[in-house]
Image (cartoon, grey):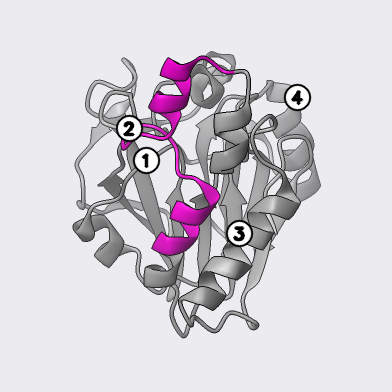
Amino acid sequence: MKFSIVGSGSKGNACLIYNKDTLIQIDMGLPLKSLKKELDHLGKTVNDIQALFITHEHTDHIAGIPLYHDRVDLYAGEGTYASANPVEPFIPLEVGSMSIVPFPTSHDATNPMGYLIEEEGCRLGYVTDTGYLSDEALALIKDCDYYYFESNHDLKMLMDSARPAVLKKRIHSKHGHLSNIDSAIYMAELIGPRTKAIYLAHLSEECNTPEIALSSYHKTLDRKGIAHDHIKIVPASQWHVVRGGE
């Protein structure tokens, strides 16, 4: 399984996940030309996408969906998107040779979802836009090969920013976004012998930097005594494709 993180951040999100015979997408908050450029790189077209899974209905995750003109089957939590097929938490769906298991996240949206994608023994845990994860969700995505995992903000940068107090409170709530440290604390519970790489998702351009996110991760994992020298930790980008998998 391989994946292309085409965009990750408040300006738009989209990820392509594929193997030799299956291509799915998670979220579509980017211009179609951005997706087409990466699809061209993969030797694919929009018509090759077999399913598009939506995490939640905020604009940076769904703005580009109408550009597909009903060419892609949509899936999302109940009530998230009018034309999407509803998914049920923890009930697997089969798309080609991949199994996709939705699980609830915690965000100020309608039935937001994360996804576990599995194929031929390879597992990708996909978590973005959440302030909290349940024990059941954590158990589901424990010891994945790869993680795409939210690391939205540095708490000090957020609190020192010019954002209104109500917005700061919302971001750092259980229905908001994970900070770098909270993200790393969750990851300390999740990573296991098979974990190869963690891709840090949805970094705030105003209240985070790739360097601060990486430093927070390394310090937190070290403090918890979690060996991670063998695990690649990569900040995803808003503006450049980041590719992963094998």
Front disc: 3 or 2? 3
Q: Are marks 1 and 2 in contact (CB under 8 Å)?
A: yes
**Is 227 one of the magenta-colored residues?**
no
Q: Which residue is mark 4?
A: 33
The mark nearer the N terminus, 4 or 1, is 4
Q: Position of residue 140 (x, y in %)?
A: 28, 63
Q: Position of residue 229 (x, y in %)?
A: 65, 82
Q: Which residue is mark 2?
A: 175
Q: Are marks 4 and 1 in contact (CB under 8 Å)?
A: no
Rounded to the nearest angstrom, the CA distance separating label 3 from label 2 is: 22 Å
The mark nearer the N terminus, 4 or 2, is 4
Q: How many marks overall?
A: 4
Locate the C terminus by quadrant: bottom right
**Horizontal arrangement in the rendering, residue 31 relative to residue 143 (left or right):** right
The mark nearer the N terminus, 1 or 2, is 1
Magenta-colored span: 163-186
Q: What's the residue type where badge 4 is placed?
A: Lys
Q: Secondary structure at mark 1?
A: loop
Q: Secondary structure at mark 2?
A: loop
Front disc: 4 or 2? 2
Q: Secondary structure at mark 4?
A: helix
Front disc: 3 or 4? 3
Rounded to the nearest angstrom, the CA distance separating label 1 from label 3 is: 17 Å
Residue 166 to residue 232: above or below: above
Q: Position of residue 146 (x, y in %)?
A: 53, 66
Residue 131 tag number: 1
Q: What's the residue type where badge 2 is placed?
A: His
